[in-house]
Amino acid sequence: MRKMLATATFALGLLPLAVLADEPFDYEATKAQYSARDYVHAPLPERGYNYFKIAENTWFVHDDFENMVFFVTDMGVVVYDAKPDVTPFLLEVVKEVTDKPITHVIYSHHHRDHAQGAYLFPEDATLIAEADTAEFLAIANDPKRPQPDIVFDDEYVLEAGGLRLELTDPGRNLHSQDDLIAWAPDQKILFTVDMFHPDAVPWIHWGESSDPWFAFGMPDLLQEQYDFNFIITGHERIVGTPEHLQTYKDFIADMKQTLGGILQSDWYHAAMGEVQSRYDESAAHFIYKDGIMSASNACSDQMIEKWQGRVRNAPLNMVENCQTMFMHLAVLDP
Ligand SMILES: [Zn+2]
């Protein structure tokens, strides 16, 4: 009996998984459940993944921290991103929710952890990528990341079976050399893969950013251009919302202000004087580095104290992010 009860409880625990393909989509309920911090800590089902709708005919599939999205159109299935770890799960989910074939797969960028699932899709599915991605894939020459069938330069609109998906190369890059922004206007779903972490601090050095100045302005750009319901960012099981993006924007503004305060403070000037007295003139690089690190460490301490609780992982990466912002604010950028 006890065993039966345990099984029943286990089965009940799994109930939300049996998300039914025909159930109408409920934005507020989805947001309340899957965009909440608690969902990051919710146990995963034994099969290692979960899935749910994030718009009508639009499904979010995730494992412990990565996700992919697919749209079921009138003609077939369109997949965004090709993560090697999530693709096998996504293929199972597609079979559960539709009989339609997978018609299109879009590369978000060339990185292995986003593209090496591409070879798992049916061979007749059309692979789409921007020109920079295609160039990197050609260099990689990796059978798991086959060359795209459709390559575009700045913009491409995929119209397939009633789905409209607008793909845009933002021109400058935030995380990789070939970032892509995708927008599904009817579903109000925005894709900025690897460029943002909802309810979290940025990944080290602003998402390993090649252009941090662009990274600092990204939330403004997205808020101006897109009235989205959800923002899909790749390495999270939590689904991003406009509120998460606003929090991120506040975080950026606060770090700028914090660093500005440090640079103008008496203690920082005193500390720099002390550093200069410690080294002789030939040690300019050591003095310079000490200056960067004292500002970054102070910024990190202050930011962690202020942001503990406002994001779920405040201590993570703070010093690296302070360091990168310091360099760009004080030295490198306008
Ligand atoms: Zn990446």
Image (spheres, helix red, strand yellow):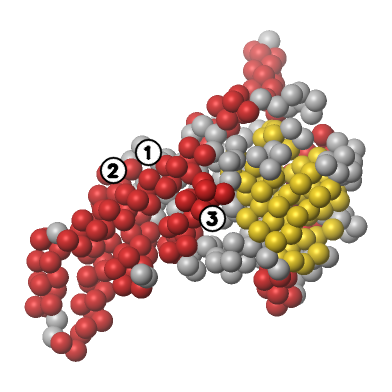
Q: Residue at x 74, y 59 (%)?
A: 156
Question: What residue is disc 2 on?
Answer: 306
Task: Determine the secondary structure under disc 3.
Answer: loop
Q: Residue at x 51, y 32 (%)?
A: 36
Q: CA distance from mark 3 to mark 2?
A: 23 Å
Q: Is residue 117 visible?
A: no
Q: Label 3 amino acid?
A: Met
- 264 left or right of 241 in image: left
Q: Quadrant of residue 250?
A: top left
Above or below, 103 relative to 290 = above
> Where does residue 12 sit, x and y in percent of width and height?
67, 19
Q: Quadrant of residue 96?
A: top right
Nearer to me, 270 or 95: 270
> Where does residue 142 sit, x and y in percent of width and height?
75, 71
Q: CA distance from mark 3 to mark 1?
A: 19 Å
Q: Residue furthest bottom?
A: 282
Task: Determine the secondary structure under disc 2.
Answer: helix
Question: What residue is disc 1 on?
Answer: 310
- Say if mark 2 contacts mark 1, CB within 8 Å: yes
For disc 1, the neighbor class at 10 Å (few under 14, some 14 to 19, many from 20) is some
Task: Determine the secondary structure under disc 1.
Answer: loop
Q: Label 1 amino acid?
A: Arg
Q: Residue furthest front?
A: 224
Q: Label 2 amino acid?
A: Lys
Above or below, 160 relative to 51 = below
Question: What residue is disc 3 on?
Answer: 195
Q: CA distance from mark 2 to mark 1?
A: 8 Å
Looking at the image, tell me whether mark 3 or mark 1 is earlier in sequence order. 3
For disc 3, the neighbor class at 10 Å (few under 14, some 14 to 19, many from 20) is many
